[in-house]
Amino acid sequence: MWHTVEALISEHTNTDFRIREKEPVSGGDINLAFRIADETISYFVKINSKHSFDNFQQEFYSLDQLNRFSAISSPKPLLLGKSIDKSFLVIEYLNLKQPNDEDWYQLGVELAQTHQDVVHGEYGWQEDNLIGHTLQRNTWSKNWSMFFAEQRIGWQLQLLAEKGIYFGDIDHICQTCHDMLVSHHPRPSLLHGDLWQGNVGFTNEGPVIFDPASYYGDREADIAMTELFGQFPNSFYQGYQATFPLQKHYEQRKNFITFIMF
């Protein structure tokens, strides 16, 4: 497989790339991940079975969109590839550092700028993608309450029901969710989609985000996600609120949002 990686990087960069260093690094619990390098440059490589190629395509597309439009930096996706039994994604390798309060404040500012400036006419995404191991539906919709009730709440409940886990009548729950959000009309902002601390980093140049599950939706979904597995530092929220304050009643709406985040 590594010979294939070398060949594709060489072709893509018009260089003679040869792996001189290779070390495993943390890549989450889904993929194997490595830093590879020759004498001059390093790359980050995610590896999984050949059946995961479509998942890597989705991640490549989301990273490309974030690089094009988000105010926050993301690692640049370089290429996708396959070997006999593996698929892989090669992206820019970033040297991360420990952040301070100013770094977190800047992340809040840049996320708010992205939510404020990068918008779409509908909710959804070019394709379905994954949040963790779970398929995320992203069919375009002009109605947020309908999109969220059906493609987030309803979809998750259906997946749970298929595993024998029931929370009640799915249609009734979806209708209740729709009714609760029907008067809420957020702009469809570009979202990271899976914004917890494990998908955030900091370099000397500023904050970075990675491992996206992007779509256009209510910006409150990104903020609610930051609170799910332990809140981000207060300076992050201060930077966000100073740039693009959240609307009233976010605290009530976020309970619906966090329901679908595992």
Image (spheres, grey):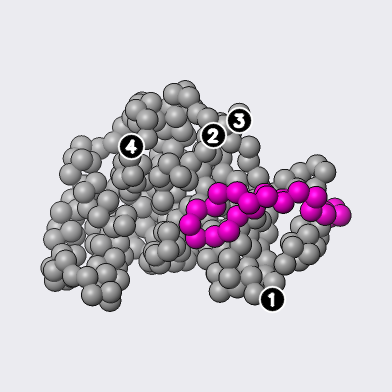
- How far apart marks 2 and 3 lie (CA) works out to 8 Å
Few, some or many residues within 10 Å of mark 2 (<14, 14–19, 20+): many
Q: Secondary structure at mark 1?
A: loop
Label 4 close to label 3 by CB (< 8 Å): no
Q: Residue at x 74, y 63 (%)?
A: 2
Q: Secondary structure at mark 2?
A: strand
Three-letter code for the amino acid on which mark 1 is drawn: Ile
Residue 178 visible? The answer is yes
Residue 254: percent from left, percent from top: 24, 46
The numbered mark at residue 202 is 2
Residue 74: percent from left, percent from top: 56, 44
Q: Residue at x 82, y 43 (%)?
A: 39
Three-letter code for the amino acid on which mark 2 is drawn: Phe
Choose between 50 and 80: the one closer to the eye.
Answer: 50
Q: Which residue is mark 3?
A: 205
Few, some or many residues within 10 Å of mark 4 (<14, 14–19, 20+): some
Q: Earlier in the sequence, mark 1 or mark 2?
A: 1
Q: Which residue is mark 1?
A: 84
Residue 68 visible? The answer is no
Residue segment shown in magenta: 12-36
Q: Earlier in the sequence, mark 4 or mark 3?
A: 3
The numbered mark at residue 231 is 4
